Amino acid sequence: MLLEAGLLNGGVGMVAAALGGIALAVALYSAPWTAWLGDGERQWVWFGSMALLVVVWSMKAGISPGLSVRFLLVTALTLMHGWQLAIVAGALVLVVLSVVGIADWHLYGANLLCMAVVPALFTAWFHELVHARLPHNYFIYFFVTTFLGAALAFNVAGLVRVALLAASGTLDAARAGPEYFAILPFMSFGEAVVNGTIIGMAVVYRPRWVMSFDDRLYLRRR
């Protein structure tokens, strides 16, 4: 979902960059740095997550010019590390992609908004909603919070991207719209499967890596 050069006009790009910058600033300020710095294993997992993100975000499925789509994996990143560290990780990955020429520096803020901020915040909100409204068990966490949440976060991020492009008037909506919305459900299902696989394996083998998962709560005897 990286935005390509020339697809946003100046005003829309500035607004998107401002929103992305504010979210990044809040994430940097409120991130649990003390706990993170005190846990070397969690640090390596976070750095490893960023390395995986660099690889995944470097790949794309192209349809119409300007409408490439990528898996995000931000739902898994958010559930494992929290929305703040997910946004910070996304910001650092975009720096790497911009340096090597895969992403456009001029659209850094807009890409940060679409690729990291929106899916991370949506995932955090959706997790709290499910936690408050539905029973606390592993199946709810896996199939609703992770699987469904990843698909919804992917679609919301995609809709924000389309909204930015529509506001800029840089794409032919009559031509590109049907193509984009045709591929989005298939990509969102793949996004859900990949995020679900990552979280499922982490919960089984290394539950302490998943900050949002409390085995005493989700796996307690009834």
Image (cartoon, rainbow, N blue to C red):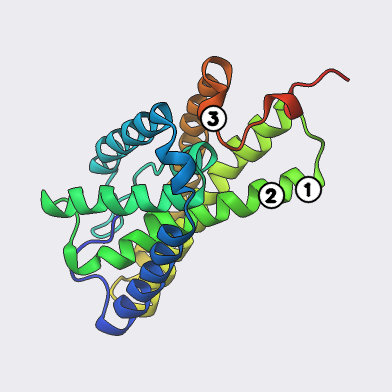
Callout 1: few (<14), some (14-19), or many (20+) C-alpha neighbours within 10 Å?
few
Helix, strand or loop status at disc 2: helix
- Look at the picture and state if 87 lies above or below 107: above
Q: Quadrant of the C terminus?
A: top right
Dot 3 alpha-carbon crowd within 10 angstroms: few under 14, some 14 to 19, many 20 or more? many
Query: Foreground residue, 66 or 109?
Result: 109
Amino acid carrying label 2: it is Glu
Q: Residue furthest top?
A: 205
**Callout 3 secondary element:** helix
Looking at this rendering, what residue extends furthest in the bottom direction?
A: 11
Q: Which residue is mark 2?
A: 128
Does dot 1 land on a helix, a strand or a loop?
helix
Residue type pointed to by label 1: Ala
Q: Does the residue at mark 2 contact the one at mark 1 (Cβ under 8 Å)?
A: yes
Give me the residue at 31% from left, 54% from top. 91
Please state if 186 lies on the left or on the right of 175 as rendered: right
Which circle, 1 or 3, is nearer the viewer?
A: 1
**Label 2 packing within 10 angstroms: few (<14), some (14-19), many (20+):** few
Relative image position of residue 88 (x, y in whole percent):
37, 52
User: Which residue is painted at 31% across and 84% down in the image?
Assistant: 11
Earlier in the chain: of badge 1 and badge 3, it is: 1
Image coordinates for residue 30, horizontal then vertical, percent: 49, 58
Q: Nearer the viewer, mark 2 or mark 3?
A: 2
Q: CA distance from mark 1 to mark 3?
A: 21 Å
